[in-house]
């Protein structure tokens, strides 16, 4: 296969590219290397593939349809669309930019698929679309979507665009609703990475809302396994599928697991709850298991230990820490949309 991966230099994208290259598929990465965090981090994510003849990089923005038309000259079997402006809280400050990147950018790629006859389109949606839905675990069959941030609303809009293009143009569209992905290479602004950095530096860890919030943390290798199965899926033309871990972990438990993995005690800095954040995410993964054979294998304790081992082995943690501080209030445009 030849797979086009948008956001392929980012966190989830680079892990997916690794897996595709190992399987001897051809991969074209489309990434704009947005300045949300240091370009050098993303360059390191893809460095091992620079000399691989099966791998190609196009540095371009999903909003620039003409640049994509000019630069994407190959024949592609599928598109995996991971690029997006990520983050709930920044979307409240800049909703127009989120609409432009996440909705118009997705439309541009669907148009590319229509024009080129690309029949498989995998879209990275988000658990944020469920919003304040009180019925947990969240199921794809539940029509009660209550998004409470512009970011979440753009993901709903993109899913609907996918349904429209699937119906009109015969493009198989799978929207994978990702639940808080973590693991090696995780973005510096996300909870597990940020808390690890602060704890090892002996700095206070900001905890929102007394640590009562809960997230369905999903290890990146399990998510990639689900995406690979989605690329191969052919049974139906349109599906929305949760990729989670079927377990909600409290913020207090996150701190306890990180303390054990890092060998330090955290100093807690209580903070008020933030607008746009939901109190709990929790995935029903029965549909993913049935359609994709999806079966997450990594417990949160094991995943946290693997992340900390990766983090402490990094030779350039200093610039990651600096970039995280500089980018803490910004919004990304080339990374997987993952609610922190």
Image (cartoon, rainbow, N blue to C red):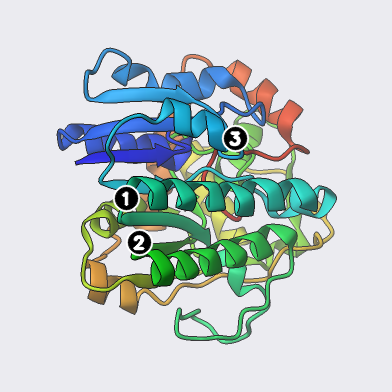
Q: Is residue 320 left or right of residue 98?
A: left
Q: Nearer the viewer, residue 170 or 54?
A: 170
Q: Position of residue 4 (x, y in %)?
A: 35, 39
Q: Is residue 46 left or right of residue 279?
A: left
Mark 2 Cα-neighbour bin, 10 Å: few <14, some 14–19, many ≥20: many
Q: Position of residue 288 (x, y in %)?
A: 31, 71
Measure how far apart labels 1 and 3 are at the Cα level: 19 Å
User: Circles 3 and 2: CB distance less than 8 Å?
Assistant: no
Label 1, on which residue?
118
Q: Residue at x 26, y 65 (%)?
A: 294
Q: Earlier in the sequence, mark 1 or mark 3?
A: 3
Q: Residue at x 35, y 50 (%)?
A: 302
**Figure quadrant of residue 339:** bottom right
Q: Position of residue 121 (x, y in %)?
A: 37, 55
Q: Secondary structure at mark 1?
A: loop
Label 3, on which residue?
64
Residue 224's place in the image compared with 289, above or below, is: above
Measure how far apart labels 2 and 1 are at the Cα level: 7 Å
Mark 1 Cα-neighbour bin, 10 Å: few <14, some 14–19, many ≥20: some
Label 2, on which residue?
171
- Whether residue 67 appears in this view of the structure is yes
**Figure quadrant of residue 20:** top left
Q: Secondary structure at mark 3?
A: loop
């Amino acid at each position: 296969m030849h797979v086009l991966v948008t956001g392929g230099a980012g966190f989830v994208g680079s892990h997916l590219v690794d897996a595709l290259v190992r399987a001897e598929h051809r991969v074209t990465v489309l990434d704009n290397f947005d300045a949300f965090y240091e370009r050098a981090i993303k360059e390191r994510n893809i460095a091992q593939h620079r000399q691989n003849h099966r791998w190609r990089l196009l540095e371009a923005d999903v909003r620039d349809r003409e640049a994509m038309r000019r630069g994407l000259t190959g024949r592609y079997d599928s598109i995996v669309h991971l690029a997006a402006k990520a983050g709930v809280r920044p979307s409240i400050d800049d909703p127009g930019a989120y609409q432009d990147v996440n909705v118009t950018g997705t439309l541009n790629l669907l148009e590319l698929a229509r024009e080129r006859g690309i029949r498989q389109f995998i879209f990275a949606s988000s658990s944020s679309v469920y919003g304040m839905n009180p019925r947990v675990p969240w199921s794809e069959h539940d029509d009660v979507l209550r998004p409470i941030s512009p970011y979440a609303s753009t993901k709903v809009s993109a899913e609907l665009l996918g349904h429209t293009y699937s119906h009109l143009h015969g493009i198989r569209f799978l929207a994978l609703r990702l639940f808080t992905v973590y693991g090696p290479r995780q973005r510096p602004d996300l909870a597990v990475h940020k808390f690890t950095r602060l704890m090892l530096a002996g700095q206070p860890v900001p905890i929102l809302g007394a640590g009562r919030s809960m997230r369905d943390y999903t290890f990146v290798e399990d998510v990639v396994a689900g995406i690979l199965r989605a690329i191969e899926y052919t049974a139906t033309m349109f599906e929305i599928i949760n990729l989670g871990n079927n377990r909600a972990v409290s913020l207090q438990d996150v701190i306890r697991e990180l303390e054990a993995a890092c060998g330090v005690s955290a100093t807690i800095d209580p903070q008020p709850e933030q607008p746009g954040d939901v109190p709990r995410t929790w995935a029903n993964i029965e549909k993913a298991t049935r359609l994709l054979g999806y079966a997450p294998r990594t417990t949160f304790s094991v995943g946290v230990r693997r992340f900390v081992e990766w983090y402490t082995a990094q030779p350039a943690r200093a610039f990651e820490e600096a970039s995280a501080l500089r980018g803490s209030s910004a919004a990304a445009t080339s990374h997987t949309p993952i609610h922190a």
